[in-house]
Image (cartoon, rainbow, N blue to C red):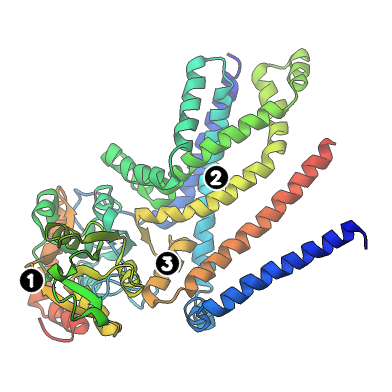
Amino acid sequence: MRSVSVRISAVILASGLVLSACGDSKTDTATATATATESWSSSKTLKICSDIPYEPMEYGDGSEATPSGYTGFDIDLVQKIADDAKLKLSVSVTPFDGIFGALNAKKCDAIVSSVSINDERKKNYGLTEGYYDSGQSLLVRKADADTYKTLPDLAGKNIGVQTGTTGEDYTKANLPAGATITSLADAPALFAALESKKIDAVLQDLPVNLFRATKNDQVTVSEKIDTKEQYAMATRKDDAATLKLLGDGIAKAKSDGSYDTIFEKYFGKKP
Amino acid sequence: MSRQRRNLILQWLAFFAGIGVVVAFLALTVEWSSLHRLFFDWAVFKDQFPNMITEGIRNTLVYTSIGFGGGLVFGLIAALMRRSSVPPARAAALAYVDVMRSLPALLVILIIGFGLPLAFGENLPSWANSNFAAGGFALAMVAGAYMAETIRAGLEAVPKGQTEAARSLGMKSGQTTVTIVLPQAFRIIIPPLTNEFILLLKDSSLISVLGIVVGQRELTTIGRQVSNSSGNYTPLIAAALCYICVTLPLTFLVRRLERRANAGSR
C-alpha cells in the first residue's frame, strides 16, 4: 500500500492536465469534422485532405487569396461546391501515401487530390464520377529527350514515382528490364531528384508533368501514356451524405458552366 | 621557449591550418551564387515573417507543451509505478518505458494518430481527433517513457535518510513521497527535463504526417510548404533560425541551472 495515495493524486493531476490540454485544442478545432452519417447543412465545415503541392491541380503555401488559403483546379472546384452548399472549406495538407489512412481516421470528410479511379479504390471508398480525364506520362531532362522516348527506353535506368499513386502501380506493372523504381513522397521531391540526376525520369500524372515542363525548360514530357484514368473525389465507403454532396456539386458545376471556367483558368482551353 | 609554450603555438597553428583548408575547399567548390539565391534570399526571408512566428513558433510551442505536460504526467506515474511494491505495476511501467523507448516517434505518431479514431470510431469526440490532441498525446507517450527514467533517477538520487527521517517523524509513506522526496527529486532533474523539452520541440515537426490545416502548422511544415510552392529554400533557413532562437536560450538556461545545482550540492 506504499504509494497508493501518491498514485491517486497523480491520476487526478493527470486528468487535470489532460483536461487543460483539451481546453488548448478547442480554440482551433471547434469547427472540426462533422460525423459521417449526418447530412450536410449550411455553415458546417467541409474538411478535405489534399496532397499539396501538385501543380496545377492543388498548390499554394496556405496564404493564397482564396478562402482555404490554397488554390488549383481541384481546390477551386471543391470550393465552388462548398460555396453552393454554404459550407466552409478547410484543407488539410496530407502526404499522398497516408491520405486514405487520414480519410479513414476521419481527419477529413473527403479526399480531393487528383485521385485516379481504379478498382481497388472503387471497392474500398466512395468515389464520385470522374471529373477530369488524366493519364500517365514520362518527364525527362531535355538533354535525354531523344534517348528516353518511351518507358521501355529506360531499361536499366532509375525511374522516379510518387509513393501510393497509380503512376507507381503502372511503373511496377510495366517495368523495363533492369530498371529500378525510386519512390518519393511528393512531386517537388521528384522534380528535384530529376533535375539533380538522381533519377532519369518521372512517371506520374500527365497534367502535373505537363505543367512542370511549362515552368522549367530543362525538362520535357517525352511520352504521354493514355491509361484512361479519371480523377474523382473520394469519401469513406459508408459516408453517403458527403458522396452525394460532392457528386451533385460536380454535376451542377458542369451544367452551370463554372466547371468550364475553372478548367480554362488552369489549362488554358475549354474541356 | 619552453616546450609547453611551443606546443601551444603548434596547436594554434594546426587549428588555423585546418580552418584554412576547409575555407579554401568550400570557396573553390561551392556555387556561391546559386547557394545565395536559393537559400539566403533576403526578400523571401523577410516574407516569412511575422507568420513564421505567429503561426509557426506558436504552434511548435503548443504541440511541445502538450507533449511535455502529458509526458510529465505519464513519466511521473510510470516512475512511481516502477518503485511500487506491487510487481505487476512495476512490470507494466517497465513494459511501457521499454516499448516506447524502442519506437521512433514518427511511428508512434502514425499509429496513435490513425489508430485512435479507427479503434474508438464514433465514441471518439472530434476534438480528440485533432492534431493537437492526437499528435500531442503521441508525443506525450514518447516523452513520458524518457521522462520516467529521468524522474526515477531523480527519486533515487534523494538520500534515503530523507525518507527515513520523515517516516520516523510519523509521516505516511505517500505523504513522504509527495512532500519530501518529489520536491527534492524535481530540483535535481530540472536540467535533464529541460533537455527533454528541447528534444520534444524538434519532434513536434513530425506531427505534420497526420495532415495539417492552415493555422495549425508548426515551423517545419510552414517552411516546407512555402519552399515547395516557391522553389526557394530560404523559408527552411528561416524556420531553422526560429528553432535556434527558441532552443538556444533554453540550452543556456539548462547550463545555468546545472551550474547552480552543482554549486548548491557542494
Q: Do the residues labelled 3 and 2 touch (CB within 8 Å)?
A: no
Q: In this view, does B100 lie to the left or right of A242?
A: right
Q: Is residue A114 left or right of residue B64?
A: left
Which mark, by number, is residue A226?
A: 1
Using the rendered image of the protein, determine whether residue B244 is visible from the camera's viewpoint: yes
Helix, strand or loop at label 2? It is helix
Q: Residue at x 54, y 67 (%)?
A: B53
Q: Is residue A227 left or right of residue B7?
A: left
Which is nearer the eye, B4 or A4? B4
- Pointer 3 or 2: first along the chain: 2
**Mark 1 is on which residue type?**
Asp
Image: B182 above or below B30: above
Which is more foreground, mark 3 or mark 1? Answer: 1
Q: How far apart are marks 3 and 1 (CA)?
A: 33 Å
Which chain letter matches label 3?
B
Helix, strand or loop at label 1? It is loop
The residue tagged 3 is: B224
**Mark 2 is on which residue type?**
Phe
Q: Distance between the residues labelled 3 and 2?
A: 25 Å
Helix, strand or loop at label 3? It is helix
Question: The C terminus of chain B lies in which quarter of the figure?
Answer: top right
The residue tagged 2 is: B68
Which is more foreground, mark 3 or mark 2? Answer: 3
Q: Distance between the residues labelled 1 and 2?
A: 52 Å
Q: Which residue is drawn at 57% across and 37% down?
A: B147
Q: In which quarter of the image is residue A215?
A: bottom left
